[in-house]
Amino acid sequence: MTRVIILLVVILMLSSALALCCIGCSRVKLPAKTVNLINRTFEDLTLGMTEKEFKSKLVYEELSQNSAADDKQYRVYSVVYNNAGIKPKMNEVDNVLDVNCSFFEGKLYEIFITYKVDYNPSWDSFIYNTQQKYGKETDLINSVMWDDGITRLFMYRAVYAEQYLSYRVTKRGYYYKVMYLDNELDARKKEQERKEAPSF
């Protein structure tokens, strides 16, 4: 009889432990995963394209002439550049102020798009179609992100700040930014930065 009682107690303890484990498991939040692979192209730009191909397709302004040879930045599709009266003119994209492109090891690893202050849909409307395409986003500070393991896509919430349209012409207001990032190239760039960082 005593053995039966001990056995029942053990069974009850195991059942309780299993129940607690199941409750704990149900509270674990898995990281958001994209439903589809993230698009890597914006207009004539594609992540991973070579600097040579980039220069053959677009009118551009170099922003990092004094940087290391394996880390270059350019501006394209820029209203600011065109308003300065420089020739030849860049193509422009609806609602976009300008686009910055960053290259590492001669390949495009980052596309950073700044929207005009005049383009001001609600935040929910701005990210809606991207949510439908890639699924639930990961919430960050003032931004959201999608990551398919190859590419990350960030959409930044509006910031009240001043946009420079041309010399002595500015506008203040809320605007949005979007960034495409190549995971592999970005990881290699950060690894190099860590190697070159000072140690105190």
Image (cartoon, rainbow, N blue to C red):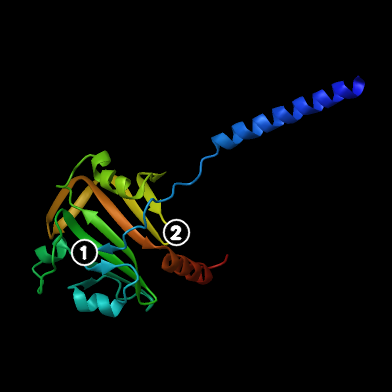
What's the residue type where badge 2 is placed?
Answer: Gly
Residue 167 versus residue 72: which sits nearer the camera? Answer: 72
At x 53%, y 71%, the residue is 195
Q: Residues within 10 Å of mark 1 (few under 14, many from 20)?
A: few
Which residue appears at 32% of the width and 63% of the height?
A: 40
Q: Residue at x 8, y 68 (%)?
A: 85
- Quarter the C terminus occupies: bottom right
Query: Which of the labelled discs sits on residue 149, or is there none?
Result: 2
Mark 1 sits on what residue?
A: 43
**Percent x, y for residue 22?**
62, 34
Q: Amino acid at mark 1?
A: Glu
In the drawing, does residue 200 fall left or right of residue 141?
right
Compared across the picture, whether 190 is left or right of 101 comes to right
Query: Could one spot residue 56 in this view of the protein?
Result: yes
Residue 159 in view here: no
159 vs 195: above or below: above
Mark 1 to mark 2 CA distance (whole Å):
23 Å
